[in-house]
Amino acid sequence: MNGPIDTNSWQYRQINARAPGLSYLANALIELVEEGHPVVAGTADLQYSNGLVRFAQRFPERFTQFGISEQNMVSAAAGMASTGAMPFVATFASFLALLCCEQIRTDVAYSALPVRLIGHHAGISLGFYGTSHHATEDLAIMRSIADLTVVAPADGPQLAAAVKTSVNHAQPIYFRVGRGQEPVVYEDGVDFQFGKAIVHGEGSDLTIIACGSMVHPSREAYRALRAAGKSVGLIDMHTIKPLDSKAVLSAAAHSRFVLTIEEHNILGGLGGAVAEILAEAGSPARLIRHGIRDEYSLIAPPTHLYKHYRLDAAGIEATVREALG
């Protein structure tokens, strides 16, 4: 179902302006192919939204346009992986994690095939497209599937680093990615290790543990609170599974409160994973889960939704202040 790429089209010319963070995905895949890795890529009619049109132009023989058939895309990726290829397939996170759950579980993870699943426009980042297009359950679903690694990069540079590191990772991976408009947190070439959190600072009052798109606003809140004299720490928990339990328990040992921040239902995602670690260890630290509180997300522009759910820097700072009393 591949067709010629119209490089003069409005979509192609606007791709970097619309989603600069996602351009890192295609660039990383191009680099891997040039290094000799057996990378192939595919998408479900979203090559302009996720930037894979750049990969398709560079390596058309390695790219498949599956059309609007997401489940078939995942099963086909499993088939490609069984022949020795390393497939990266991408579509909206709401479709990938929910619609394709059976194919991910049975065809990919159960079969232990090195498929890389890119769920982009995760959380509430699709705004006006509506609740059906919001992915606020995907972390809970994906982390419950055995032998599936779950990663939520904070920005484009970290996504690129994770993609490049994945060539040495035997397990299938679910990458939870935003809409490509997230502010940059890290420089190009940032070090990335699966299952190894990035500690930005420690605090005796409270430690924020954030993932994905929430790392940047959490960092802004963290800086404001530190400037105001609050002893607050910050951890980027980019790998949801396997979770860095040592980082969680270290934070709990040094802080009175642990606050998880996620663009996701507070049930089953990052907050749930941290709760399991703290409960099993018998930690005395109090956990506060901050996100969407077990409800279907509203429909509005993303900026309005982040403010409504207090997932912007101001909302996170206010949540911390309330916790500290």
Image: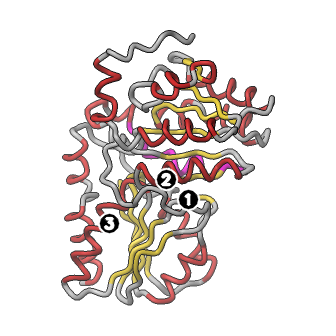
* Residue 9, horizontal then vertical, whole percent: 32, 15
Residues at marks 2 and 1 touching, judged by CB atoms closer than 8 Å: yes
N-term-proximal mark, 3 vs 1: 3
Residue that carries the numbered disc 2 in the rendered image: 152
198 horizontally vs 63: left or right: left
Check if residue 59 falls in the magenta segment. Answer: no
User: In the rendered image, is residue 253 in sight?
Assistant: yes
90 horizontally vs 169: left or right: left
Whether residue 248 is situated above or below residue 172 in the rendered picture: below
Residue at image location 70% in from the left, 52% down from the top: 169
Q: CA distance from mark 3 to mark 2?
A: 15 Å
Residues at marks 3 and 2 touching, judged by CB atoms closer than 8 Å: no
- Dominant secondary structure (helix, strand or loop) of the stretch shown in magenta: loop
Question: Which quadrant of the view contains residue 40?
Answer: top right
N-term-proximal mark, 3 vs 2: 2
**Relative to the observer, which residue lies in front, 22 or 115?**
22
Residue at image location 41% in from the left, 75% down from the top: 200
Q: CA distance from mark 3 to mark 1?
A: 17 Å
Residue that carries the numbered disc 1 in the rendered image: 240
Check if residue 141 falls in the magenta segment. Answer: yes
50 horizontally vs 318: left or right: right
Residue at image location 63% in from the left, 24% down from the top: 62
The magenta region covers 134-148
- Mark 3 residue element: helix
Kind of residue indicated by mark 1: Ile
Residue that carries the numbered disc 3 in the rendered image: 218
N-term-proximal mark, 2 vs 1: 2
Kind of residue indicated by mark 3: Ser
Whether residue 314 is situated above or below residue 305 in the rendered picture: below
Kind of residue indicated by mark 2: Ala
Image quadrant containing the C terminus? bottom left
